[in-house]
Image (cartoon, rainbow, N blue to C red):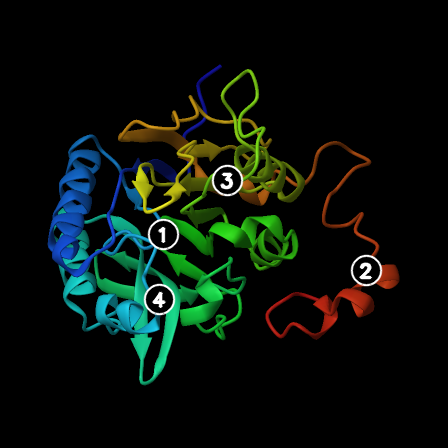
Amino acid sequence: MSESVAVSAVRVAVVQFDPQVGIHNIQSNLQNSLDLAREAAMNGADLIVLPELANTGYLFANRQDAFDHAETIPDGPSVKAWINFAQKHQVYLVAGLAEQDAMQLFDTAVLLGPDGFVGKYRKAHLWNKEKLWFTPGNLGFPVFETSIGRIGLLICWDIWFPEVPRLLSQQGADIICSLNNWVWTPPPLFDETGKCMASYLTMTAAHVNNVFIAAADRIGKEQDARYLGCSLIAGTNGWPIGKIASADEQTILYADIDLSTARSAPIWNNLNDLLRDRRTDVYDELLGYCHHPRLPR
């Protein structure tokens, strides 16, 4: 029997590195992101995912400091550099940055591709001091049609809210790009296998929604904060494809996947279909899903 040919064969790469806060670090953060993305592209990646706030670092001193680090989309210098990279290498690139829109700031992820700017997502769930400088996202949870498949975006704390990956998957996302600055919280932080709770949340979201999730985290320290690493790429069954990254090493993880398989994955057997088995008559009105304009009824 001949092997089946992948309909949408994609090499996904998640980049784990250490962007540091400070205006004087923006250019080096950006250059490091481009160097690592170039390595991923040279190794055949079609979709490259960078962490949250990849060009600025995370712990701003105050709101003015956050403004000083922010830029507009898509005309800011970092976004332009990432767009040029995506066009030059004919890849899709996802990156996080602080976005300025008039007098508001957003923790934003951008999706860029061979043809330039594709779209953006603004973080809906703000963590801790983020609430002091960012405005909660107001763009909903968009899914973007691309030549390699349907791509959804979420950022860090969002993964703790199961509604986010569920809404993205219900809109047909083949893969969710998860951009993170997972911080150390009270112990225990890791289990005996080296996984952190965010690893399990990512794996669970992939499993219960039958969607690929590419989670790129950062490493390093800033002020009194330390970051978890643990980047991973989860398959539609929830299990990591390949290894989970360590807590302290710069690395690039790769996975060769057929994104189109996400569209048939919800049918587990003749009697269990994840989408069909949802009791929307019981809980949709309570959850508000039936009011979401982009979800099928």
Nearer the viewer's eye, disc 3 or disc 1?
Answer: 1
Q: Residue at x 42, y 65 (%)?
A: 121
Residue that sits furthest to the front in the current view: 224
**What percent of the width, then of the height, locates residue 76?**
18, 70
Q: Residue at x 86, y 62 (%)?
A: 281
Give yes or no for contact between labels 2 and 1 (Cβ–Cβ under 8 Å). Answer: no
Separation of marks 4 and 1 at Cα, in angstroms: 16 Å
Give the amino acid at mark 4: Gly
Question: Vertical placement of 152 versus 293: above or below?
Answer: above
Q: Which residue is mark 3?
A: 212
Q: Which residue is mark 4?
A: 119
Secondary structure under tag 2 reads: helix
Give the amino acid at mark 3: Phe
Q: Residue at x 39, y 28 (%)?
A: 247
Residue that sits furthest to the right in the current view: 282
For marks 2 and 1 on the same chain, the one whose residue lies earlier in the sequence = 1
Question: Left or right: 92 with respect to 5?
Answer: left
Q: Which residue is mark 1?
A: 52
Give the amino acid at mark 1: Glu
Question: Vertical placement of 71 versus 46: above or below?
Answer: below
Separation of marks 2 and 1 at Cα, in angstroms: 33 Å
Q: Residue at x 84, y 54 (%)?
A: 279
Give yes or no for contact between labels 3 and 2 (Cβ–Cβ under 8 Å). Answer: no
Picture quarter containing residue 44?
A: top left
Say few, some or many: other residues with alpha carbon within 10 Å of mark 2 (under 14 / 14 to 19 / 20 or more).
some
